[in-house]
Amino acid sequence: MKHYKTLEALPDIKGKTVLLRVDLNVPVQHKKVSDLTRIKRLKPTINSLIAKGANILILSHFGRPKGHESQELSLSFLPPLLSEVWGHDVGFKEKTSQITLLENTRFHAGEEKNDPELAKQWASMADIYVNDAFSVSHRAHASTEAITHFLPSYAGHLMDQEIQMLTAALEKPQKPVTALVGGSKISTKIGLLGNLIKKVDVLILGGAMANTFIAAEGYDVGKSLCEHDMLETARNIMKQAKENNCTIILPKDCVVAERFEPHAEHTIVSISEIPAHTMALDLGPQSMEQIKSIIDQSKTLLWNGPLGAFETLPFDHATVELAQYVAQKTKDKEIISIAGGGDTVSALAHSGVKNKFTYVSSAGGAFLEWIEGKDLPGIKALSLQQST
């Protein structure tokens, strides 16, 4: 059962004003948006509210202006693009259209302080609040948490979709469930790993993070990126996994090179034979075959983090090969694949399969905190309102 109200529960809002929190913190180069994903995903909520006859005021942050106005971080460049993508006129600051984009929420010092006075000021402009920004709901800010104390509050379609998909992956999954976690450090993902081993059947580790676990097993990882001060933590995670009947899979072999640079000379070695003067930069073929066979036996896959140094060719090979393998299994309806986290989305885009998984979360930090099992303030605020 959902613990928050969705747009289906909205009263008659014809002629009413909706304050809509979205995430337009999009990648920009020379004032040109390089990835429209977040903007496109907001269209269903925009269409719903327009169809119901509402006026929409949009709140979003952009960059880190730290409470000061900055022309460089103004949202003024976005309305023409939003109008084009959404198919509805979007005004800026002054209410000249049915949809109006307000200025960067973080120009106000009170935004990141969750200031109730700022929230009250925004609330006075509207009749209803809708949060469609799962990706910022891990922050208790005035536009995500305090605002819910002053207006009837609802979850937008994208917010609801994110929550439903992550709940399906972790709380009510089709089993067996496999999690694939890569990236560079376990120190940033201890909470995530600790929660996953209680929820999934198999946990596959890749990326530089796996080096720390390999070292914890007593192997020499040479010059590989490794958190040697985290070896005991890695051993504890492996011990807890065993207690929770979760199988941890570490690489069997890896691609090593003496230098970390594009097209560096490289070779494939067993993890027990990493030369002291080299570093592990990608998974080897034996590891890949093992991972594929586990995926063949899985019904749900949760993916966070690349398997190797995918930004530097040719050390993207394992990430690309596996991403394409999972995409094909997804297309054949043999697995439910859910991915999220900043590097993960970049890695899937690099592999050409960003739109070929069952669901790719638009969130970074919020996705990780959800998987850690934390309460996200923006979602908790919607849930609390439902119970009052």
Image: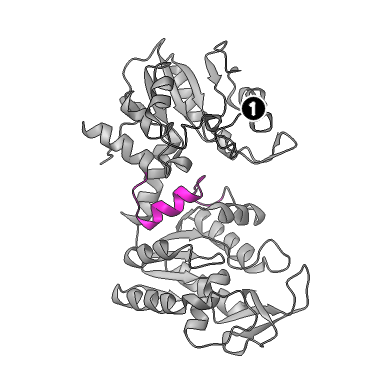
**Visible in this render: residue 176?**
no
Q: Could you say where residue 260 lies in the image, as x and y percent from the top left? A: 73, 72
Name the quadrant of the N terminus.
top left
Relative to residue 238, is residue 279 drawn left or right? Answer: right
**Visible in this render: residue 188?**
yes
Relative to residue 332, is residue 28 drawn left or right? Answer: right
Q: Residue furthest left?
A: 388
Identified at 48% across, 19% down, the residue is 56
Residue 364, magenta (yes or no): yes
Up-down: is 250 above or below 153?
below
Q: Could you say where residue 128 lies in the image, as x and y percent from the top left? A: 37, 21
Up-down: is 262 above or below 224?
above
Which element is circle 1 on? loop
Q: Magenta part of the protein: which range?
A: 356-376
Name the quadrant of the C terminus.
top left
Q: Could you say where residue 354 lies in the image, as x and y percent from the top left? A: 59, 50
Q: Residues within 10 Å of mark 1 (few under 14, many from 20)?
A: some
Identified at 67% across, 26% down, the residue is 77
Q: Quadrant of residue 28?
A: top right
Up-down: is 81 above or below 287?
above
Residue 380, magenta (yes or no): no
Instruction: Say which amino acid is labelled 1.
Output: Leu
Q: For mark 1, what is the residue?
A: 78
Viewer-side residue, 174 vs 260: 260
Identified at 62% across, 79% down, the residue is 254
